[in-house]
Amino acid sequence: MDEEVASADAASGKACFTFMIPLEKSMKTVLVADDIATSRELIRTVLEQCGHTVLEASDGAEAVRFALEILPDLIVLDLHMPTLDGFGVLQKLRGDEKFTRTPIVALTASAMQGDRERALSAGFTSYIAKPISLNALRSEMERLLA
């Protein structure tokens, strides 16, 4: 989004000049929960390059705690994590009215037939299978954060 700035001549009221000032995108906060550090790092790097703040959780219980503390704009959950899996985290968060409109993305390396439909019907906003395409990840994150 750009901001237009104009200056008018006091006597005539006619514009003397006009220019556009690009405004920075508002930075969003994203919670990424995955028990595999390299997966978190990849997603964090992509999101930080897009100007967003990223908080990481290494298991489901930590993800729930961080989500309740920071109320992120977007949450990315690995479906298979210790303590509490992605479906369990989703259930806890969607049960809280603060998270009814928060985009929550399912992330998994074990993409079997029917997994996408199962995740979406459970209440995930989107589904991403590993290995992750960086362009697809970037596009999907920006779409959900728009």
Image (spheres, rainbow, N blue to C red):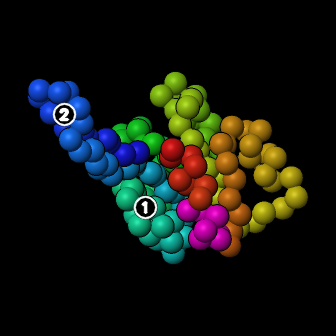
Q: Which residue is mark 2?
A: 8
Residue type highlighted by circle 1:
Cys
Which labelled disc corresponds to residue 123?
Answer: none
Tell me where the magenta segment starts and ends, as one range. 132-138
Q: Is residue 46 left or right of residue 24?
A: right
State the residue at coordinates (45%, 57%): 57
Q: Nearer the viewer, residue 80 or 83?
A: 80
Quadrant placement of the N terminus: top left
Rendered location of residue 24, percent (x, y): 33, 51
Which of the 4 image quadrants contains residue 4? top left
Which of the 4 image quadrants contains residue 91? top right
Residue 16 in magenta stretch:
no
Task: For marks 2 and 1, give the CA distance.
Answer: 36 Å
Regarding residue 51, the answer to whether it shows in the image is yes
Rendered location of residue 3, percent (x, y): 32, 42
Residue type highlighted by circle 2:
Ala
Q: Nearer the viewer, residue 128 or 3?
A: 3
Q: Which residue is mark 1?
A: 50
| Precedes in sequence: disc 2 or disc 1 | 2
Q: Is residue 81 left or right of residue 25?
A: right
Mark nearer the viewer, 2 or 1: 2
Label 2: element kind: strand
Rendered location of residue 56, percent (x, y): 43, 59
Q: Is residue 120 left or right of residue 105?
A: right
In this rendering, is residue 135 above or below 99?
below
In this view, the residue farthest toward the right is 113
User: How would you rate the neighbour count of disc 1 (Cα within 10 Å): few for under 14, some for 14-19, many for 20 or more?
Assistant: some
Regarding residue 40, the answer to whether it shows in the image is no
Provide the major secondary structure of the magenta segment: helix
State the residue at coordinates (65%, 71%): 133
State the residue at coordinates (64%, 64%): 136
